[in-house]
Image: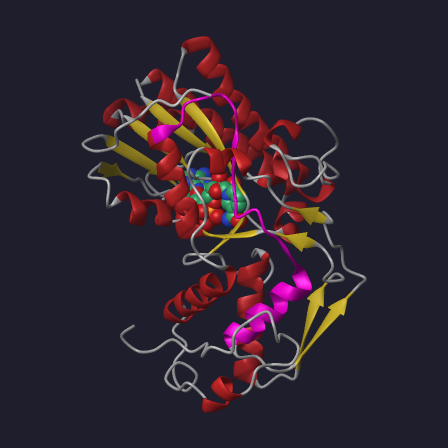
Amino acid sequence: MANAPFELKGKTVFVAGHRGMVGSALLRRLAREGADLLTISRSEVDLRNQAAVDAWFAAKRPQAVFLAAAKVGGIVANNTLRAEFLYDNLAISTNVIQASHANGCEKLMFFGSSCIYPRLASQPLREDSMLTGPLEPTNEPYAIAKIAGIKMAEAYRSQYGSDFISVMPTNLYGPGDNYHPEYSHVVAGLIRRFHEAKVSGAGSVAMWGTGAPHREFLYVDDLADASIHLMKTYSSPELVNIGTGEDITIAELALMVAAAVGFRGEISFDTSRPDGTPRKLLDVSRLARLGWRAQTSLEEGIQLTYRAYLADNKWTAPERTACPDKWRKQADPRIRGRVSPRCPVPRRNG
Ligand SMILES: NC(=O)c1ccc[n+]([C@@H]2O[C@H](COP(=O)([O-])OP(=O)(O)OC[C@H]3O[C@@H](n4cnc5c(N)ncnc54)[C@H](OP(=O)(O)O)[C@@H]3O)[C@@H](O)[C@H]2O)c1
């Protein structure tokens, strides 16, 4: 694997999807790099529109591109909006990668997803397991579009020598996540449901599935840091997984989120609902060899995310202004040994 230092300082850098969770984290992190940042809203340029994308690239000619625009969602969205997940993601990747090539872009990072790996690939998931078996059916359209994007980046590299690289983030969470009641990812969905149950005084929350699947979660600001590290130091057709290398069960995650939110009722599991892939843990040994490790613990990241959720959602006192003493005194017996009984309530001004 070649390492090619790439300077971001002074370069025009386009973050596609800058209003999304990943794109906004990239902007926060890129602010430290001294780059000239370019963004464009969907109302000005729909990235599915080839003519609009071509015209914008011809006018702006970004020197570096982070391709973090995509149609993204949880298991329900992926499985319901199958045509949109395939069409939108194919169109966005095709248009942006081709326009980057045609307009002299020096470096591009394509964001794939751990969904590209076969449903039953051996764990932890190695980068070379892509295309070695059938995909998880519930998100196959999304995965196929992502694999096409990876192959495009690879093909432009081999045919034209373009310095286009692809990274595979694990499940992400953090500020800017999507809290849609049906279409959210698991951490955001749990935060919303436990928060609403706490506020309404509901005694229980029902979870989809058995709670048994194992998942890995990465705080989105860590993803942004890893991405900038790789953009500056990595140049190879080989994919790079970005994750923590650690997973927990969905049931354990639910307890952790409930603790952070301060929901103290019952959590039940609706086992008639689908679980999805039984386990999804990335092998992050390549990333470690490239000199990067995640910094934010899951517990800390969930607390930061809940703070951001409250700030975003105009939820007011009392739960935002008071840190109940009982929280400090009582550890929930269901989570003892996993989560410290820290106050989940964000403080004013901090
Ligand atoms: N979230 C995860 O857990 C996760 C995990 C692995 C990989 N990834 C990858 O990371 C990347 C970013 O994900 P994310 O979680 O940040 O998603 P997100 O929050 O939904 O953001 C997606 C962004 O793409 C933009 N976008 C979508 N369709 C567009 C279109 N037709 N034209 C212009 N802009 C469009 C959205 O614009 P609007 O603001 O206008 O909607 C939004 O800014 C994606 O490639 C995703 O596959 C995400």
Q: Is residue 193 visible?
A: no
Taking the magenta stretch, the answer to whether it contains residue 244 is yes
Camera-side residue: 93 or 322? Answer: 322
User: Quadrant location of the C terminus?
Assistant: bottom left
Segment colored magenta: 233-261
Relative horizontal placement of residue 34, taking residue 39 as reference (left or right): left
Q: Quadrant of residue 213?
A: bottom right
Residue that appears at 66% across and 42% down: 139
Q: Is residue 277 above or below residue 195?
A: above
Q: Is residue 311 above or below residue 68?
A: below
Q: Quadrant of residue 148?
A: top right
Residue that appears at 62% across and 76% down: 336
Indicate the position of residue 6 as horizontal and vertical percent values: 30, 26
Camera-side residue: 107 or 71? Answer: 107
Residue that appears at 74% across and 54% down: 275
Relative horizontal placement of residue 210, taking residue 45 as reference (left or right): right
Residue that appears at 67% across and 26% down: 131
Camera-side residue: 36 or 231? Answer: 231
Camera-side residue: 135 or 331? Answer: 331
Taking the magenta stretch, the answer to whether it contains residue 211 is no
Q: Tell me, what colour scheme is on the image?
A: secondary structure
Considering every residue shown, the one lying at the far right of the view is 272
Considering every residue shown, the one lying at the far top of the view is 159
Q: Is residue 144 visible?
A: yes
Indicate the position of residue 310 as horizontal and vertical percent values: 41, 71
Q: Is residue 93 above or below residue 252?
A: above
Indicate the position of residue 323 as horizontal and vertical percent values: 41, 85
